[in-house]
Amino acid sequence: MMTTTTIAVTGAGIGGLAAAAALHRRGIDVHVYERGERLREQGVGMHLGPNGTRLLHRLGLAAELERAAVRPKALEVRACHDGSLVTRQDMGAGWERAFGAPYLTVHRGDLHRMLASLLPASRVHIGRELVAFEEGRKGVTLRFADGTSTRASALIGADGVHSVVRRALAGEEKPVYSGNSALRGLVDAADVPGLDPSLMYMFAGPAARVLLYPVSGGRQFTYVVVAPAPEGHAESWTGAAGPADLDAALTGWAPQVREVVSAAREVRRWALYDRAPLERWSTARTTLLGDAAHPMLPHHGQGANQAVEDGVALAVCLAEAGPGADGIAAALRRYEAVRRPHTARVQLGSRGGRAPGKGVRDQAADVAWILAHDVEQSLYAAETAA
């Protein structure tokens, strides 16, 4: 890359920061523009599959993840009515040996902080909401809501499911409501003594399911309750809900689940909408990443992992590109050619993953090909195959 090349990333979520950290690590001048007035990540816990963890380790975050994340020993599926054990999938060291990196659960805020620490403060600009951009022969001009503008050699749209960049590339879309929403939040592990903070749990009912997993070094549990809900809720991770909604959805459930209901204080609703994979992500100087490229239902727990994979793959492609506009265009073509088929497969597969009543071993088989994936190797494997 020419030393004058500057990459602009719009959106300082997990994907945007991962891309920026990977670019910065490779010596590429990168700037992140975040609409919020401070750098923070909303949400609760998240899964880091080995496919994501291996990349975060390469970025230098292994020690911090060891302190803040949890490596679950197993996933236990339990009966929704009495909490009795139905089946168990061992994970822990066995999965690390099988996939080459650990499966972790982590608070989103902890991972967000780690990724932000990999960038100089001067490279992250808050209060800069992208409203428009124009791509020209010499670069991309970004225009912000505060009236300011800036120029870059290329633009990465990592601005989430309501992406300004996606809308410019793909036009207006009408997402399809899945019929379900997820009630989510955190409880202190000390307040749910029926749960072991070294384990993940799934309670599967006839129409709903509850997933519980430890975060914050085992001091807290994230709960996710996926259940039918009428259409009309906003498509947001932090939609309004309350303990009464949680209580109503889980009346009569197992004692361990009722412990979570009693301990829950702040409850958020995420209405689950679906979209078809895009037919293209990129132009000569602009591309998409993460939820802006491939928003997916959460049933494989892969949204953030796929965004991290995108970020690292894009950094490799740009670092290995030739100089000037032709080099950037070739890098974006390479990135999309490798990533779009893979993420489309994950996106479509997530529509049916972890359905109520589905066996835990079947679920593990569903995602094994995802967890074993090494995106850096895939870039070269695709070229060798071609």
Image (tube, rainbow, N blue to C red):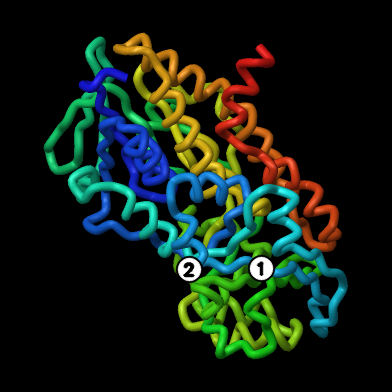
Q: Nearer the viewer, residue 369 or 249?
A: 369
Residue at 45 percent of width and 24 percent of height: 317
Q: Nearer the viewer, residue 181 or 289?
A: 289
Residue pointed to by mark 2: 68
**Residue 253 horizontal side relative to residue 311, left or right:** right
Residue at 40 percent of width and 39 percent of height: 22
Residue at 64 percent of width and 90 percent of height: 193
**Residue 348 horizontal side relative to residue 379, left or right:** right
Residue 330: x and y in percent read 44, 13
Residue 227: x and y in percent read 67, 65
Q: Nearer the viewer, residue 138 or 279?
A: 138
Residue 89: x and y in percent read 80, 64
What label sits on residue 329 in the rendered view? none
Q: Is residue 362 above or below residue 188?
A: above
Q: Is residue 274 above or below residue 231?
A: above
Residue pointed to by mark 1: 72
Write down the quadrant of residue 228 in the picture.
Answer: bottom right
Query: Can residue 196 be seen in this snapshot?
Result: yes
Q: Nearer the viewer, residue 97 or 373?
A: 97
Q: Secondary structure at mark 1?
A: loop
Q: Quadrant of the N terminus?
A: top left
Write down the quadrant of residue 6 in the picture.
Answer: top left
Residue at 67 percent of width and 51 percent of height: 300
Residue 114: x and y in percent read 38, 57
The residue type indicated by label 1 comes to: Pro
Badge 1: few (under 14), some or many (20 or more) residues near its Cα, within 10 Å?
A: many
Q: Secondary structure at mark 2?
A: helix
Query: Can residue 174 be seen in this snapshot?
Result: no
Report, in whole angstroms, how far the alpha carbon at label 1 lies from the one at label 2. 13 Å
Q: Quadrant of the C terminus?
A: top right
The residue type indicated by label 2 comes to: Ala
**Residue 314 horizontal side relative to residue 306, left or right:** left
